[in-house]
Image: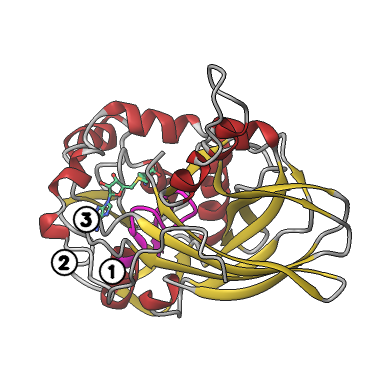
């Protein structure tokens, strides 16, 4: 096997330590990040529809990571009796003001703290949370949501989102390939051949958030993880899966686009796919070395999502992609890539 990417050794999973997470919570203290999320109407309106569908009068709701409180407002408007809007970020002081200004002081209680550590007077009927980072897993906030679920959710309670699916699509997209590293080295630079630099690029690959709406799929998207947010343990989110992609037309394979689909309520699915309305998550770009492919070629991938094995930032996942490219049954090549999650 030609090891194409500088693989980093896997280490046992560490827990995200909320106490040591000051910088993370500081990143949510200012207006800009909340403006970006609230400006994302696809995201916010989908949550609004799901909350409207699932909240019934008399319910108690826990909003994990309330931010400026938008999901709590939706829940209160839908008739919840009590809503706990929990956040560990300093934004909560503004949220308290927003709750008063909007006249929900009697329903929404702002709780300053870490959702999985706070104590509540009783169990809740519904947990709502917008915890998804890039390709869902970046920020690893689902760990807090799972612990909060196990601690605070009443038997028979519900979760928003109720399920999350992670998907990959093999694509042709020369512009992304050129702009995000690998393709840059293929043309001569100032009259010199720099093509060997592509190996250095491959040894240290990131997965960035990109606008993949111009991407041409070379095979249908495949689901690499399908997680039941109500029942599955936290460990299942650090998934691994084997999938086969059968190429449907000749083209140049430049990499894979990652997206997620959050099932917020029955019939309410928030998709971040490149052919769905764009969200602030956009798509996650997993570049690989360019290959000229034919219809009928098969790419078999084993894909693994893990916490940063260097331990530098446990909120940034690392993705391992090991695979085989076959044509008419013969192996053309084998490959291994390691992509490091980023916040952008
Ligand atoms: C992606 S933002 C969502 C904000 C808001 N719910 C919305 O939809 O606009 C996530 C928020 O969760 C908070 N957060 C993350 N982990 C948390 C935890 N364990 N306990 C409490 N708050 C948390 C962050 O400070 C941030 O404000």
Q: For this rendering, which residue is in front, 117 or 257?
A: 257
- Say which element carries label 2: loop
Could you say where residue 32 lies in the image, as x and y percent from the top left?
Answer: 33, 27
Residue 35 occupies which quadrant of the picture?
top left
Crowding at label 2, few (<14), some or many (≥20) Cα neighbours within 10 Å? few
- Residue at image coords 54%, 24%: 192
Tell me if 235 is positioned left or right of 246 in this view. Answer: left
Could you say where residue 324 lies in the image, as x and y percent from the top left?
Answer: 67, 70
Q: Which residues are magenta?
A: 127-143
- Residue at image coords 15%, 64%: 118
Say whether disc 2 or disc 1 marks the residue closer to the N-terminus.
Answer: 2
Q: Nearer the viewer, mark 2 or mark 3?
A: 3
- Residue at image coords 34%, 59%: 140
Say whether disc 1 or disc 3 marks the residue closer to the N-terminus.
Answer: 1
Q: Residue furthest top?
A: 190
Which corner quadrant holds the N terminus?
bottom right
Q: Residue 117: which disc?
A: 2
Identify residue for label 3.
312
> What secondary structure characterizes most of the magenta part?
loop
Say whether disc 2 or disc 3 marks the residue closer to the N-terminus.
Answer: 2
Verify whether residue 168 appears in magenta.
no
Task: Indicate if the residue with disc 2 has its beta carbon within 8 Å of ligand 1.
Answer: yes
Tell me if 95 is positioned left or right of 169 in this view. Answer: left
Identify residue for label 1.
148
Q: Cα distance, mark 1 to mark 3?
A: 25 Å
Task: Indicate if the residue with disc 1 has its beta carbon within 8 Å of ligand 1.
Answer: yes
Q: Nearer the viewer, mark 1 or mark 3?
A: 3
- Say which element carries label 1: helix
């Amino acid at each position: 096997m030609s090891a194409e990417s500088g693989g980093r050794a896997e280490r046992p999973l560490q827990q995200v330590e909320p106490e040591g997470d000051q910088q993370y919570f500081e990143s949510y203290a200012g207006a800009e990040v909340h403006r970006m999320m609230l400006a994302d109407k696809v995201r916010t309106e989908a949550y609004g529809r799901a909350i409207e569908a699932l909240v019934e009068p008399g319910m108690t709701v826990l909003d994990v990571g309330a931010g400026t409180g938008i999901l709590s407002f939706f829940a209160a408007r839908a008739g919840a009796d009590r809503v706990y809007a929990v956040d560990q970020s300093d934004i909560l002081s503004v949220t308290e003001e927003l709750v008063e200004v909007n006249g929900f002081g009697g329903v929404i209680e702002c709780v300053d703290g870490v959702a999985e550590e706070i104590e509540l007077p009783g169990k809740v009927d519904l947990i709502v949370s917008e915890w998804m980072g890039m390709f869902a897993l970046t920020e690893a906030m689902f760990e807090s949501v799972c612990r909060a679920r196990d601690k605070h959710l009443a038997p028979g309670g519900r979760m928003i989102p109720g399920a999350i699916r992670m998907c990959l699509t093999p694509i042709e997209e020369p512009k992304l390939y050129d702009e995000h590293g690998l393709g840059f080295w293929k043309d001569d630079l100032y009259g010199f051949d720099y093509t060997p630099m592509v190996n250095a690029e491959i040894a240290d690959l990131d997965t960035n958030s990109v606008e993949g709406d111009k991407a041409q799929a070379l095979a249908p998207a495949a689901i690499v993880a399908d997680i039941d947010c109500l029942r599955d343990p936290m460990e299942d989110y650090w998934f691994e899966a084997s999938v086969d992609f059968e190429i449907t037309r000749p083209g140049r394979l430049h990499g894979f686009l990652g997206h997620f689909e959050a099932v917020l309520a029955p019939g309410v699915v928030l998709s971040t796919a490149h052919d769905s309305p764009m969200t602030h998550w956009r798509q996650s770009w997993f570049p690989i070395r360019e290959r000229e492919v034919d219809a009928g070629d098969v790419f078999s991938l084993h894909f693994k999502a893990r916490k940063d094995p260097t331990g530098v930032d446990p909120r940034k996942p690392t993705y391992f992609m090991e695979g085989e490219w076959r044509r008419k049954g013969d192996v053309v090549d084998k490959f291994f890539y390691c992509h490091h999650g980023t916040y952008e």
